[in-house]
Amino acid sequence: MLTLSRFRLLNTIVPAATIGVLFECFLHHRHDYAGHFLGGYGATLAVFMIWMRELSSPQFSVWAMRGNFALYVFCILLGVGTEATIFRIAKFDEIDFCNQSLGAVVAALVALSFAGKAKPPVREFDYGLIAGIAFLGAGGCFAVA
């Protein structure tokens, strides 16, 4: 039986893995496209999991939904900053930025499955954080391949 806890864990893994596989199937000549998508997804998911985990129960019922858009915009701007500074090997690549942003959009939508009136157990955020770190690592591996 699929419990809400298992649904949330699958929800952190399946969408990004599916889209990553589609990137590889159709754009296999450019592994960095999948890498930037997975990196953007993983980093944004990790930020959301840390932020939601640290909210108190009364704050969670209000800010888990309200803060989603602001945190998503923050993550996009962080992607702009990293693409323009840290990863500026050749030039600012708009396609890489677009793929990072697509990953961030998917992560923000996944984070909505954690939002609600009652705060889920802390371990669910920890599992989401682990998934985010794993996708960020996988994205780094694909981006340099």
Image (cartoon, grey):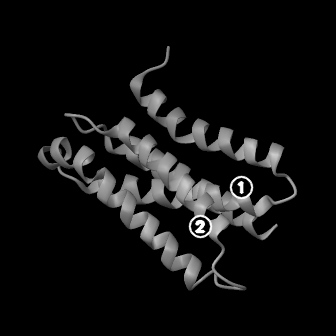
Above or below residue 88? Residue 42 is above
- Counting from the top left corner in percent of width and height, residue 20 is at 69, 47
> Can you name the residue that lies furthest to the top here?
1
Q: Residue at x 66, y 42 (%)?
A: 19
Q: Amino acid at mark 1?
A: Ala
Q: Residue at x 45, y 34 (%)?
A: 8
Q: Which residue is mark 2?
A: 97
Above or below residue 2? Residue 73 is below
Q: How many marks?
A: 2
Q: Is residue 74 left or right of residue 15?
A: left
Q: Residue at x 41, y 60 (%)?
A: 47
Q: 36 or 61, which is in the foreground?
A: 36
* Mark 2 surroundings: few (<14), some (14-19) or many (≥20) residues within 10 A: many
Q: Is residue 97 left or right of residue 66?
A: right
Q: 142 or 104, which is in the foreground?
A: 104
Q: Is residue 65 left or right of residue 25?
A: left
* Mark 1 surroundings: few (<14), some (14-19) or many (≥20) residues within 10 A: many
Q: Which residue is mark 1?
A: 34
To which quarter of the image does residue 75 belong?
bottom left
The span from disc 1 to disc 2 (Cα, nearest Å) is 12 Å
Above or below residue 18? Residue 81 is below
- Counting from the top left corner in percent of width and height, residue 6 is at 48, 28
Q: Which mark is residue 79?
A: none
Mark 1 or mark 2: whose residue is earlier in sequence: 1
Q: Amino acid at mark 2?
A: Phe
Q: Is residue 58 left or right of residue 143?
A: left
Q: 129 or 76, which is in the foreground?
A: 76
Q: Are marks 1 and 2 in contact (CB under 8 Å)?
A: no
- Element on which disc 2 rests: helix
